[in-house]
């Protein structure tokens, strides 16, 4: 009877807990029937499993509720920072938060994180102390509840039960079936494979060109032109970038599938040429599926994309990223994409920092060295790190406002000042890189783009939310201009998945 009461209480309290979710979802009584079934089955399974392990039904209930509330609080923090609720693919970030706490925990809040940790430890201690193990054992009834939960989940997950399919818009799916059911649907859908864009399979980059150019691609962390947001910024902050755009073969605004974070969404779109609509559930983190493909077969072929197409055309392919290669599982994914070499933080050693990360300007000598050492045309894909948040952990220095603004912003916009301080370095990096490539002894083409806008909630509250749009340019050195002509396309707005093909489509066909 004790176990039955605890299980019933678990169903009621788990439903009630969803009221703490922001934005608040549709009330449970308005869910589809399978939403009820999956929520009930999943929470029942968790509670029954904990009861089997602990032998204490009420303690198991408290612990199951605590785990659900942890997901809810993380979802709320994610929505506040990124305007997106928690999805199944985000569970990977729990382990990332342990390995890279500075990138994640500040958005939850260090005090909130400490409070959650203390509450979990206190619940474990008090639960084990206050509730003795049930007399007569609960293994049999708990095992029966677990089997029943499994049958309920199985029935609700059948092919007929899953119609219509998820929309892959988290808030829409949350409103339709609730949080736990949407997490389950997104997990189940990950079994579906990723299909590559067909044009990479027949791509012939720079076909017929006797001297194909070196290609340098800069995926600049959180890069966008904030003057569209706040016009009081000094023009010299982006002087280097503005000069590059003025000399570029093509430049403009770039639609990206990430906002505030989730770099891999823009990164994969650029490399793969696939729009969000073609990815299904993999749009949230396509590297999860790719990482599972490594090692499945000896001599496995590359996943067709920009890098593998260039590699097949005789290019040497290198990634430079001043952070651990294991982040986002790039160390497993990038060989599958066709990269020959990955230069990460371990190899960069004591490269100069700007703030907590390796500075953008410190990457220029690395790029020049890699180009000089390559006996064949090279693709160098650079993933910068300097402007990675959390911005609010850094401090405004004396003189920053005078150097960065014509008119200082409203109070509470320190994040914008920190951002501009790093953005100025990114802009200088762009200018210095084009100057270096201008005297490069081989033809060279540079593509530069931002992966997403930065996280600056107070700034956006004051001046409005920017769209999921960054900036880019494609620039040619004199040897490319001489071989293919100096015609410029001018301003052309693109989606990021179109940019990779433009690297050789411009003047190379």
Image (spheres, grey):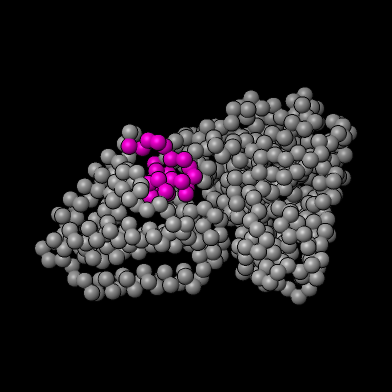
Q: Is residue 319 left or right of residue 116?
A: right
> For residue 67, which quarter of the picture?
bottom left
Q: Which residues are magenta?
A: 161-188
Q: Is residue 178 left or right of residue 393?
A: left
- Nearest the viewer among 150 and 200 is 150
Looking at the rendered image, the quarter that the C terminus falls into is top right
Quadrant position of the N terminus in the picture: bottom left
Majority secondary structure of magenta residues: helix
Q: Nearer the viewer, residue 474 or 324?
A: 474
Give residue 189's position: percent from left, percent from top. Answer: 42, 40
**Vertical placement of 167 versus 460: above or below?**
above
Quarter residue 52 falls in: bottom left
Q: Is residue 324 visible from the viewing direction of this image? A: yes
Residue sitting at x 79%, y 27%: 209
Residue depicted at x 53% and y 49%: 329
How many marks the image carries: the answer is 0
Q: Is residue 508 left or right of residue 461?
A: right
504 in magenta: no
Question: Does residue 134 lie above or below 360 as drawn?
Answer: below
**Which of the 4 quarters of the picture holds residue 114?**
bottom left
């Amino acid at each position: 009877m004790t176990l039955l009461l605890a299980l019933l209480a678990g169903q009621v309290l788990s439903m009630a807990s969803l009221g703490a979710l922001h934005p608040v979802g549709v009330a449970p009584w308005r869910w589809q029937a399978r939403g009820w079934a999956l929520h009930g089955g999943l929470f029942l399974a968790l509670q029954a499993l904990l009861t089997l392990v602990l032998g204490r039904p009420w303690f198991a209930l408290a612990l199951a509720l605590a785990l659900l509330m942890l997901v809810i609080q993380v979802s709320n923090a994610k929505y506040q920072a990124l305007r997106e609720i928690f999805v199944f693919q985000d569970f990977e970030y729990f382990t990332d938060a342990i390995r890279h706490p500075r990138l994640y925990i500040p958005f939850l809040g260090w005090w909130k994180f400490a409070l959650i940790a203390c509450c979990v430890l206190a619940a474990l201690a008090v639960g084990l102390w206050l509730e003795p193990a049930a007399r007569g054992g609960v293994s049999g009834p708990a095992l029966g509840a677990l089997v029943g939960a499994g049958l309920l989940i199985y029935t609700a997950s059948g092919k007929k039960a899953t119609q219509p399919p998820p929309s892959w818009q988290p808030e829409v799916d949350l409103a339709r079936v609730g949080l736990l059911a949407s997490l389950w649907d997104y997990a189940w859908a990950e079994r579906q494979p990723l299909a590559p864009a067909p044009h990479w399979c027949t791509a012939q980059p720079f076909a017929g060109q006797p001297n194909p150019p070196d290609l340098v691609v800069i995926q600049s962390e959180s890069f966008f032109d904030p003057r569209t947001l706040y016009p009081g910024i000094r023009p010299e902050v982006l002087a280097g970038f503005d000069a590059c755009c003025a000399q570029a073969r093509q430049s403009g605004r770039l639609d990206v599938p990430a906002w505030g974070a989730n770099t891999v969404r823009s990164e994969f779109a650029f490399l793969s040429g696939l729009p969000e609509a073609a990815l299904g559930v993999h749009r949230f983190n396509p590297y999860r599926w790719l990482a599972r493909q490594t090692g499945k077969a000896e001599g496995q072929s590359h996943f067709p994309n920009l890098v593998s197409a260039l590699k097949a055309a005789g290019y040497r392919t290198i990634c430079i990223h001043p952070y651990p290669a294991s982040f986002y599982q790039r160390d497993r994914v990038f060989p599958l994409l066709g990269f020959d070499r990955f230069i990460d933080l371990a190899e960069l050693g004591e490269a100069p920092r700007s703030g907590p990360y390796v500075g953008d300007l410190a990457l220029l000598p690395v790029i020049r060295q890699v180009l000089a050492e390559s006996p064949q045309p090279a693709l160098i894909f650079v993933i910068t790190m300097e402007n990675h948040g959390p911005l609010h952990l850094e401090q405004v220095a004396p003189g920053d406002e005078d150097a960065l603004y014509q008119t200082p912003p409203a109070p509470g916009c320190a994040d914008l000042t920190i951002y501009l301080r790093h953005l100025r370095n990114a802009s200088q990096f762009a200018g210095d890189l084009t100057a270096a490539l201008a005297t490069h002894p081989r033809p060279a083409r540079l593509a530069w783009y931002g992966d997403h806008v930065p996280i600056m909630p107070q700034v956006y509250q004051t001046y409005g939310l920017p769209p999921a749009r960054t900036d880019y340019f494609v620039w040619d050195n004199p040897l490319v201009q001489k071989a293919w002509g100096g015609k410029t396309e001018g301003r052309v707005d693109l989606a990021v998945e179109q940019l990779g093909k433009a690297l050789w489509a411009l003047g190379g066909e």
